[in-house]
């Protein structure tokens, strides 16, 4: 019984590597949460939220939540309240 290695093209390799990178980032984030690494974002900070649909929103951090899937940030902007992944939030640079 002979076994033939499957050959992958550039797009398949790129897709597999991207998946491995995302898995490594997720593991890193989970380990940081386990170790108790503090977040740079604090309640009351002014932030910009990048939503998955490409839109941005400016608001204030209401709370930092520790969940099983990682840190979540609750952001308020007027009457709108969003709970987003910590990766979607960046601090507004100070003047």
Image (cartoon, grey):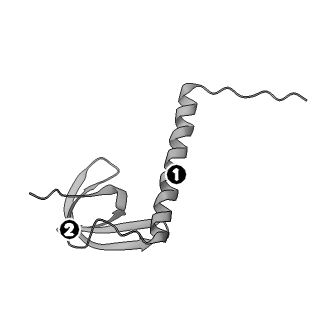
- Residue shown at the point (33%, 56%) measured from the top left: 88
- Residue shown at the point (43%, 72%) measured from the top left: 36
Q: Earlier in the sequence, mark 1 or mark 2?
A: 1
Q: Quadrant of residue 13?
A: top right
Up-down: is 14 above or below 56?
Answer: above
All told, the count of numbered labels is 2
| Disc number lying in front (1 or 2) | 1
SS at mark 1? helix
Q: Say which of 63 and 82 sits in front.
A: 63
Q: Position of residue 55 (x, y in %)?
A: 26, 49
Provide the residue designation for mark 2.
45
- Which numbered tag is attached to residue 57? none
SS at mark 2? loop
Q: Residue furthest left?
A: 95
Q: Residue furthest right?
A: 1
Q: Position of residue 42 (x, y in %)?
A: 26, 71
Q: CA distance from mark 1 to mark 2?
A: 29 Å
**Can you say which quadrant of the picture contains the N terminus?**
top right
Q: Residues within 10 Å of mark 1 (few under 14, many from 20)?
A: few
Q: Position of residue 19 (x, y in %)?
A: 53, 44
Up-down: is 75 above or below 94?
Answer: below
Provide the residue designation for mark 1.
24
Q: Is residue 62 left or right of residue 37?
A: left
Q: Is residue 32 left or right of residue 45?
A: right
- Residue shown at the point (17%, 68%) measured from the top left: 78
Q: Say which of 85 and 81 sits in front.
A: 85
Up-down: is 17 above or below 61?
Answer: above
């Amino acid at each position: 019984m002979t076994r033939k290695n499957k050959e992958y093209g550039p797009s398949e390799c790129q897709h597999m590597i991207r998946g491995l990178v995302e898995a490594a980032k997720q593991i890193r984030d989970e380990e940081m949460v386990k170790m108790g690494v503090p977040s740079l974002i604090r309640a009351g900070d002014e932030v910009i939220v990048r939503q998955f649909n490409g839109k941005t929103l400016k608001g204030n951090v209401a709370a930092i939540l520790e969940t099983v899937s990682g840190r979540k940030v609750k952001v308020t902007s007027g009457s709108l309240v969003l709970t987003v992944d910590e990766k979607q939030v960046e601090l507004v640079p100070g003047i």
